[in-house]
Amino acid sequence: MTEPAREFDSENAHPMVKEVMERSQQNLLQCYQCRRCAAGCPVGEETGYITPDRLIRMIILGDRENALNNQLVWRCVSCYTCGTRCPNDIQTARITETIKKIAKENHLDPLKPKVAHFHDTFVNSGVRWGRLNEMEFMSFFELKNTLKDLKRLKFKAIYDELVAKTKLGLNMARRKRMHMGFQSAKGRNEIKQLYKKAKKKTV
Amino acid sequence: MDIGYYPGCTLHASSSLYDVQSRRVFNEVGINLKEIEDWNCCGATSAGKVDDFLAIAMPARNIGIAEADGFSEIVIPCSACYSRTLVAQKRLEDDPLLKKEINTELTKKIQGTIKVSSILEVLLTKVASGELAEKVSQKLKGLKPVCYYGCMQTRFPYKVPVPDDVENPQGMETVLKVLGAKPLDWSYKTDCCGASAAVNDEEAALNLMARIMKDAVAREANCFVVTCPMCQLNMDSFQDQFCEKNEIKERLPVYFITEMVGLAMGVSVAELQIDRHFVESTELLKELNLI
């Protein structure tokens, strides 16, 4: 795919690089575009021309709009292959993880809403009871997806999701892999307090 | 010998067979897995994508509990829990202020001195001492597994000491050779199965899983062996789906390493709960006269 030439946005560039570098604790400026990350990225086929090195370039040039919402940010599986192979020790997966947070704080609609729902719901469930209850978590996750699809009148998507998840559920039940019990940690308030602290920090 | 044990949420739910197998097999080599009290969810990979402070704080509480319980070592079979806990420990060591801040909310404070071990690290000490070999009552002859490590066993988002080769780990192979199996060399041992993408970005994940499967089939493996419950669930429960989509005829059982160790020790299929896999997993063992 031909990639359009990038422009330098002097207004956005500095604050953007500074924010991403501080929060991800990665030195983006050390990237010399060798593209070892791109070569090893397992979701490279899914992300179009946006590879980890391109994402770093976008941030450095101040292309805020595209950097905050692109296929790589939402389809990165955090396998950490890019960072493990980077000759300059830049862990790009930490950058995509950071951008997810910045995008959320800026109320941007994620390109892959299901990915965002998944991680939000997972953490909420884990914090709520101190331990993750798979059934509760998956129910909330599917409910969120369905509501989103309903709003957009995507009935086919709702149907497909229902069929896929019923199939998985029945399969799991048959293998006694479906856990109907409930688990929690008594000390979960400690985690909740820490979560409150964490939220205060980012605001 | 008692070792601290962190099962994590999955080993108490959909992968409870891994919990049963781990306890049983370790007991056999003289290790008593003592579950730490009132542990909480480690946050898995999701916490790192939602909140950085929480991603450290959640596993930190468990480290504090294990240390207060008096353990000098804690073993974590789930690769994701292992990775998050190890990273949290290193981050706290490098950032005393953060440690202090988290400790203010914790009843059981973190010291940071405990050794966080993966299941392979502990098994490998028993290989080195010869105790594992002594317990093998039947060699796993005819078993040609590909060892599938996935991401979280050797790649970390932070600089931590990695106990195996990052790109070509050998821990599982070393254990399986002692058991009499013939692990095969292959190219996808540390590739990603997609993890949670299997339910939130299905197409991407199924493509990743199919690639792993194709190489395993091309190498003429007759099963996968894994340590990660996420990899296990994905490669097992979605195997029909990604194979049909990619016209792969073969189906391969996806065993936990503990199942293999247990089998070689003569533990029964029922006790190891080998019947809880999605892909038929006992036929192969019957064919090879292992059960």
Image (cartoon, coloured by chain):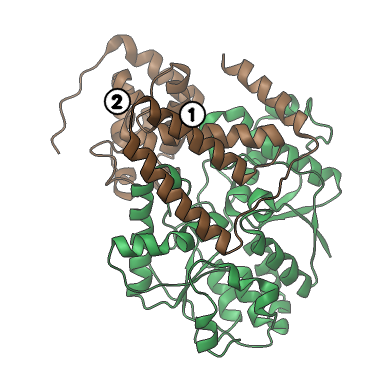
Chain colours: A brown, B green
Q: Is residue A7 visible?
A: yes
Horizontal side, residue B26 vs residue B156: left or right: right
Image marks 1 and 2: residues in contact by CB distance under 8 Å: no
Horizontal side, residue A175 vs residue B191: left or right: right
Nearer-the-camera pick, A88 or B110: B110
Q: In this view, does B258 lie above or below A102?
A: below
Say which residue label 2 marks: A58
Secondary structure under the numbered disc 2 in the rendered image: helix
Q: Is residue B143 above or below residue A193?
A: below
Write down the chain letter for disc 2: A
Q: In which quarter of the image is residue A187?
A: top right
Nearer-the-camera pick, A174 or B50: A174
Query: Which amino acid type is marked by label 1?
Result: Ser
Write down the chain letter for disc 1: A
Residue shown at 31% from the left, 69% from the top: B248
Q: Earlier in the sequence, mark 1 or mark 2?
A: 1
Q: What residue occupies the far top of the structure in this picture?
A: A11
Query: Within 10 Å of the Cα at label 2, are there few (<14), some (14-19), or many (20+) other Cα atoms?
Result: many
Say which residue label 1 marks: A24
Residue shown at 71% from the left, 37% from the top: A130
**Quadrant of the image containing the C terminus of chain B:** bottom right
Residue B45 x, y percent position in the rendering: 54, 41
Residue A102 x, y percent position in the rendering: 45, 21
Gap between marks 1 and 2, in whole Å?
A: 16 Å
Residue B43 x, y percent position in the rendering: 61, 39
Residue shown at 37% from the left, 42% from the top: A159
Q: What residue occupies the far bottom of the structure in this picture?
A: B289
Residue B41 x, y percent position in the rendering: 67, 42
